[in-house]
Image: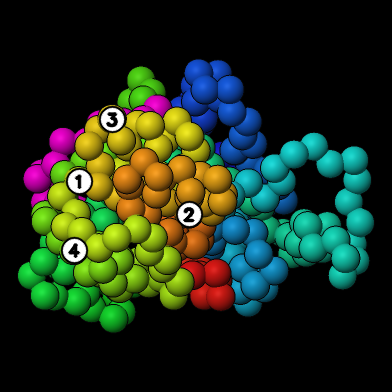
Amino acid sequence: MKLNEIYALLDALAPKALSDEFCKTYGAYDNSGVLVDAGGEIDKALFSLDLSLAAVEEAKRAGAGLIVTHHPAVYSKIGGIRVSDFDPLGKKLAECLKHGISVVSMHLNLDAAPFGIDESLMEGILSSAQRAGAGLRPPKDVAAIDGETIDNKAIACTAISVAAIYQPLSVGGYGRAYDVPPVSLKALAEGMADVFGAKRVAVYGAERTVKRAASFCGAGADEGALEFAARNGADVVISADFKHHILALALETGLAVIQLTHYASENYGFENYYRKIRKQAGIPCVFHTDEALL
C-alpha cells in the first residue's frame, strides 16, 4: 500500500479536520498527520502510543514500513536533528529514515473523534464499574479478545449513560461526564487497574459510592474541567498528570480523584483504534506497548 492510501483510512476514523477545529475553537496546538514520509510501499504497520526507541526497534524487527502513533513524533518546530545518545528524537527519526519507516501521528483528532481515545476512556471506566459491581474481573489477555467483542461491550456500556461533553466539536469532543453503575471508589479504581492494564492507580478523597464520573484522557484536567465535573454532578474526576493545585482544588471542591498514568489513560483507546484499522487495512498490523509507562 502507498502511504497516502493508509493515511486516508486512518483519517476516515479520526479526521485531521477535528484537530484543526479543536485548535481553532479552544486555542490549542497540534501536529497531527504525516510526519515522516520514507517513500516506498508499506507492507506492514506498527501502532504505538509514542515513537519510542523500543517501538522503532520493534518496527525494524517486524519489517514494518509505517509507525502510527498517537502522540506526535515531532511536536514543535525543530532547528535541526542531531544523532546522539543525548538526542533520542534525532536518533529515532534517523533510524526510521535509514530503514524506510514512515511515521504518522493521530493526536487531538483521535482524542476527540467519536469512538476515539477520550470516548474509549469513558467506555473503559463504565466497563470497570460494571465489572466491579458484579464482582467480575476481565480476562488477563485483553489483547486476545476479538475487536468486535470489545466494541459491542463498549456500546452496551455507553447505552446506560448520557454523556455531557466538556469541549464539544461538530462531531465528538473532549472530556465527558456520565452516569456509572453505583460502585465504591476503591472498587472502581481496582476495576480500572484491571481493564486498563494500569500498574499505577492513585486514589484521592474519602471513600464514597460513585454514581457519576467525569473523565479526561491524558493531561486534560484543568480548572475548567473541574468546574465542568462539579456542575455536572460528578462524584469523581478521572484523568492523568494532575498538577498539585488542580488536585488540591478537586479535593476542596468535594470531588474524589482517580489518577492513571498518562500512558494508561490513552493506550486503551489507542489499541481500540488499532483494532478498527486492522480490520480494514489490507496489510498486517501489530501493536506495541511500552509496559514501563503503564
Distance from Cα at disc 3 to Cα at disc 4: 21 Å
Q: Which residue is mark 2?
A: 240
Locate residue 140: give its quadrant: bottom left
Distance from Cα at disc 2 to Cα at disc 3: 21 Å
Looking at the rendered structure, which numbered label has been put on residue 34? none
Q: Which residue is mark 1?
A: 212
Decide which of tag 4 and tag 2 comes sooner along the chain.
Answer: 4
Contact check, label 1 and label 4, Cβ < 8 Å: no
Q: Residues within 10 Å of mark 4 (few under 14, many from 20)?
A: some
162 in magenta: yes
Q: Secondary structure at mark 2?
A: strand
Q: Which residue is mark 4?
A: 184
Q: Which residue is mark 3?
A: 231
Residue type at tag 4: Ser
Residue shown at the point (71%, 46%) measured from the top left: 74
Residue shown at the point (87%, 70%) measured from the top left: 85
Q: Position of residue 128 (x, y in %)?
A: 22, 63
